[in-house]
């Protein structure tokens, strides 16, 4: 919009007029930005041209601070003028509320404005470095489109992965039957069980219902991926995945399951609620800034807390930088590249740990910074996720984390990366319209208040400052905890320094023992580590956790052995090889072995990827009927 050439005198102004120093490049940059967000509700003109029309403004005042002239002749200067201008943009109105009503905010804002006005050349350089030369505020309609497509893919893969395992894990004849768990909890907790376990399987937990739940979730993921009924599909997909976690118990107790529920919940408020989003309908409403910031806050917590817990755990292997010397071969399911990474020299492993700490502790702050710094932060975090995915199979975690990083990138990046026709179809003309109604803004403000309260409380608990959380807040957080709306994160706080694998063996006569082979976890020494992500073999994963303790600490393990003694086909289908295909064994036991990667010499000589030594009897011999 061109600058007003002949603004009217103050007595007949049609709309507020902001006077600024026209000789200041820093001022011109921000005025161009404010003109964009206020969308014609405020006029802007250089003070050198029009200040003389307003005798209520002291000579030279506009050179020291911007002056906002209201239609009734009132004049506001400095920080207050800026906040009043921004209040004409509905999404920015809350800032004026802070300035007017939050104790201490007004003097702090005035002091900051004064310091910036006195050092405009430096802050002009800082703005150019951190934001760029384009004064237009960043838009995120294309970023949202990419993020929702990726989230739909994650939902599809997560539900499909569960679909092929859920009967063996949670079915009527599975390892941990959901129907038995629900009945026991209902008997123990009464009506409270419906709040503590918010799951649709209260209506039915039959095998057919469990399959339908996963199939429906996968179908919803496809709808989100295709942009069909995105908003309703996100609500239903979130509800279905939330329904699985309480009944999944040990098999769905992973941080990425909680991350998917939390991300999916926020995505409900990010999505454009229309029957069709793309490619059938042109244009997309503006992405709500509050929800974008909540998703950035989620990404920040995910990465920053992962770095914090490594230091707070007191694990010497993180502190002396030797953790990655163990990680590649002790992690649950390594990839083939993990074998090669484990052969790297000690100095490189230690340098890599330094890189992990820098990326997890420092880089997350960049995603909360201005545009250019956010881009740098997103790229570095994506690089970390790609390196993690190259050496370990972590289900859909890396894909989901990358999706959060991609949402940090603004549309200027995607305009260069996506086909022009697709960009025009998504952007259309709606990208310049107001983002939401007043009711929508109130709803998102309440959402932000609730989620920030929960997440900050959880974060303080992780950082060892939970005692500072008021009991009222603590009770509120606990009441909402079954819905996993904001969670505490932190991966690999303590590094395991040995790899214990449990080998389950069966026997028909008590003398000849045959091993059960799992599909993906290490077993056969000559079998190459697999590529399996984003699929997650949940039984294989739980076997890794079981090896860290005893079978008494993992009650599900005895249930697994019972199912193998019964020859339950739903459970044996989770394994790669059943040595008793015709009739189940009469006896069963479990032996623990210590596994380690071979080196180049041993692998050339034997062809094996692993070596192993027996450790102890993990589970004593039992027979059918015991």
Image (cartoon, rainbow, N blue to C red):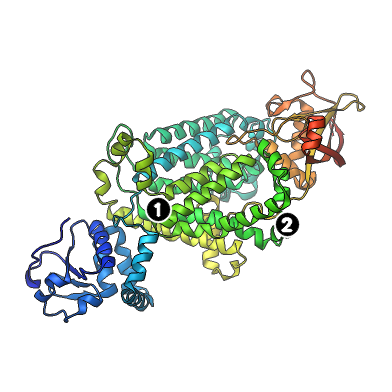
Q: Position of residue 24 (x, y in %)?
A: 25, 69
Q: State the image coordinates of residue 18 (x, y, percent, origin top left).
A: 19, 68
- Find the residue positioned furthest to the top: 582
Which secondary structure lies at badge 1? Answer: helix
- Residue placed most toward the observer, 159 or 207: 159
Q: Horizontally, is 201 left or right of 341 in the view?
A: left
136 sits to left or right of 533? left
Which residue is outermost to the bottom? 58
- Determine which residue is flagged by label 1: 291
Front in this rendered view, residue 380 or 446: 380
In this view of the protein, which residue sits in the foreground, 538 or 117? Answer: 117
Q: Position of residue 230 (x, y in %)?
A: 38, 38
Q: Is residue 403 above or below residue 26?
A: above
Name the quadrant containing residue 67.
Answer: bottom left
Q: Is residue 271 visible?
A: no
Measure how far apart labels 1 and 2 are at the Cα level. Answer: 38 Å
Is residue 623 among the parts visible in the rendering? yes
Q: Is residue 448 left or right of residue 468?
A: left
Q: Badge 2 is on which residue?
A: 317
Please report the residue visible at 55 percent of the width from the left and 54 percent of the height from the top. 303
Cβ atoms under marks 1 and 2 closer than 8 Å? no
Asked which secondary structure carries label 2, the reply is helix
The N terminus, quarter of image: bottom left
Image quadrant assignment for residue 615: top right
The residue at the point 53 percent across, 43 percent down is 242
**In which quadrant of the rendered image does the C terminus lie?**
top right
Question: Residue, x 47% and y 58% (percent of image)?
Answer: 366
Residue at the image point whose x is 74% and y is 50% from the top: 496
Disc nearer the start of the sequence (1/2): 1
Q: Nearer the viewer, mark 1 or mark 2?
A: 2
Residue 619 in picture, x, y percent from top left: 84, 39
């Amino acid at each position: 919009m061109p600058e007003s050439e002949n603004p009217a005198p103050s007595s007949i102004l049609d709309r507020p007029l902001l006077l600024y120093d026209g000789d200041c490049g820093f001022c011109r940059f921000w005025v161009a930005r404010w003109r964009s967000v206020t969308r014609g509700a405020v006029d802007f003109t250089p003070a050198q041209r029009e200040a003389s029309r307003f005798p209520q403004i002291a000579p030279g005042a506009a050179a020291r601070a911007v002056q906002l002239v209201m239609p009734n002749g009132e004049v506001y200067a400095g920080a207050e003028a800026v906040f009043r201008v921004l209040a004409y943009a509905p999404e920015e109105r809350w800032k004026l509320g802070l300035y007017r009503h939050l104790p201490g905010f007004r003097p702090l804002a005035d002091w900051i404005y004064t310091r910036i006005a006195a050092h405009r050349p430096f802050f002009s350089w800082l703005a150019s470095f951190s934001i760029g030369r384009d004064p237009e505020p960043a838009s995120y309609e294309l970023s949202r489109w990419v993020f929702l497509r990726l989230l739909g893919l994650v939902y599809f893969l997560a539900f499909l992965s569960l679909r092929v395992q859920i009967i063996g894990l949670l079915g009527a004849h599975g390892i941990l039957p959901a129907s038995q768990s629900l009945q026991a909890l209902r008997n123990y907790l009464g009506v409270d069980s419906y709040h503590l376990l918010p799951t649709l399987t209260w209506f039915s937990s039959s095998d057919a219902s469990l399959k339908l739940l996963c199939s429906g979730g996968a179908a919803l993921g496809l709808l989100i991926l295709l942009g069909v009924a995105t908003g309703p599909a996100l609500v239903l997909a979130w509800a279905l995945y939330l329904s699985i976690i309480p009944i999944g118990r040990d098999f769905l107790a992973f941080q990425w399951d909680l991350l998917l529920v939390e991300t999916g919940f926020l995505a409900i408020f990010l999505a454009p609620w229309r029957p069709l989003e793309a490619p059938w309908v042109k244009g997309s409403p503006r992405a709500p800034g509050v929800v974008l910031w909540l998703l950035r806050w989620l990404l920040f917590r995910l990465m920053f807390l992962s770095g914090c817990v490594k230091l707070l755990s007191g694990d010497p292997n993180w502190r002396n930088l030797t953790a990655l010397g163990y990680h590649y071969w002790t992690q649950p399911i390594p990839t083939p590249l993990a074998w090669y990474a484990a052969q790297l020299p000690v100095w490189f492993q230690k340098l890599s740990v330094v890189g992990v700490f820098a990326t997890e502790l420092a880089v997350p702050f960049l995603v909360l910074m201005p545009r250019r710094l956010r881009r740098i932060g997103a790229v570095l975090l994506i690089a970390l996720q790609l390196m993690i995915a190259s050496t370990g199979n972590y289900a859909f975690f890396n894909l989901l984390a990358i999706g959060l990083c991609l949402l940090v990138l603004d549309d200027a990046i995607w305009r260069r990366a996506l086909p022009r026709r697709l960009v025009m179809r998504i952007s259309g003309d709606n990208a310049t319209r107001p983002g939401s109604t007043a009711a929508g803004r109130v709803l998102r403000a309440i959402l932000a208040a609730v989620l920030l309260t929960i997440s900050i409380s959880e974060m303080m608990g992780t950082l060892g400052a939970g005692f500072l959380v008021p009991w009222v807040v603590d009770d509120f957080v606990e009441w909402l905890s079954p819905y996993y709306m904001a969670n505490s994160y932190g991966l690999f706080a303590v590094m395991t320094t040995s790899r214990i694998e449990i080998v389950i063996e069966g026997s028909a006569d008590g003398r000849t023992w045959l091993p059960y082979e799992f599909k993906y976890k290490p077993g056969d020494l000559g079998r190459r580590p697999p590529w399996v992500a984003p699929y997650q073999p949940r039984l294989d994963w739980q076997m890794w956790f079981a090896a860290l303790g005893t079978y008494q600490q993992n009650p599900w393990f005895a249930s697994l052995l019972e199912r193998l003694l019964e020859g339950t086909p739903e459970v044996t289908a989770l394994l790669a090889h059943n040595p008793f295909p015709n009739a189940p064994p009469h006896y069963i036991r479990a032996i623990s072995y210590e596994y380690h990667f071979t080196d180049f010499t041993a692998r050339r000589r034997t062809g094996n990827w692993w070596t192993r030594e027996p450790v102890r009897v993990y589970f004593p011999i039992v027979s059918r009927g015991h």
